[in-house]
Amino acid sequence: MLSAHEKEKILSASQLWFKNTLAINHLKNTVKLVDPGKFNINPFLIGYLSKYLSGDTSPRSIARALIYPRVLGSSITTSFGQNLQTYITQVLSAFGSTTSGIDIEYIDSVDGRKKYCQLKAGPNTINRDDVTTIDNHFRSIKNLSKTNSLDLQMNDLVVGVLYGEDAEISSHYKALKNDRHYEVIVGKNLWYKITGDERFYEDLQSALSRVAGELNGQKELEETIEALAAHPDIIELSQSFS
């Protein structure tokens, strides 16, 4: 179980990583969206989405319908997944693994056994090919354990999902769990098993949300919407719905 000092160290490091790796880049990527060329605009849907969101197809409403999904959805979600390795090496370095194909190793707070864990971002972030890759990594560890006479059980091979709940995992995670019989541990339960702290998951969420107070992007977001709405292409698109 983590000491209070170790817990605070991880929470602080998580905040710093989130701010410097994700939040600042999120803001930089937001202000770039003043150019319609940054979007793949679907002319059949954008009028509908604009009206659905704001009740009209004014340039500003179209700009909002374009920017909101990018800024509040795909942009930050993609960045989180792409930077997961950075999080592992910078924040979870205390649990780092030298075993090929394994992200972290930890002593399970429940059963006391050493776990070999591949970390994934969320409950829908792997595909069919990832199932094979993960299986191959774990098979290599099983072969190594036989060669070196290591005490390795099937439930010592873990796919750890940083957020979400068991009921949300995709069919690919279920294939690892039900067909390959590996442990798939999700969200709050994963962090509890790693840290021994039942509240760590909630405390980590709170710590990361506080970063928003330091980097409030509301002003930049509104300025970007206004700039995009003023672009001739967006004005012309708006007029086409008149």
Image (cartoon, helix red, strand yellow):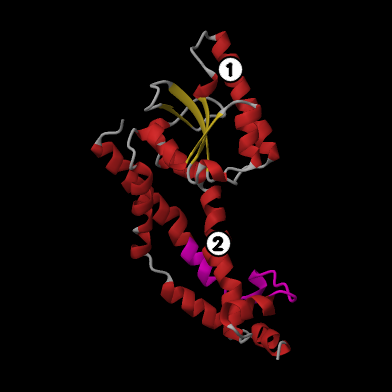
| Helix, strand or loop for disc 2 | helix
Q: Residues within 10 Å of mark 1 (few under 14, many from 20)?
A: some
127 relative to 228, above or below: above
Query: Residue at 40% across / 35% down in the picture?
Result: 93
Q: How many marks?
A: 2
Which residues are drawn in magenta?
26-45
Tag 1, which secondary structure? helix
Residue drawn at (64%, 70%), measured in percent from left and top?
A: 38
Query: To which quarter of the image does residue 100 belong?
Result: top right
Residue that mark 2 sits on = 73
* Relative image position of residue 43 (x, y in whole percent): 74, 76
Residue corresponding to mark 1: 142
Q: Amino acid at mark 1?
A: Lys
Question: In the rendered view of the protein, which quadrant contains the N terminus?
Answer: top left
Residue 176 visible in rendering: yes
Residue 99 position in % (x across, y down): 52, 24
CA–CA distance in space, label 1 to label 2 = 39 Å
- Which residue is drawn at the image coordinates 45% and 53% (left, top)? 21
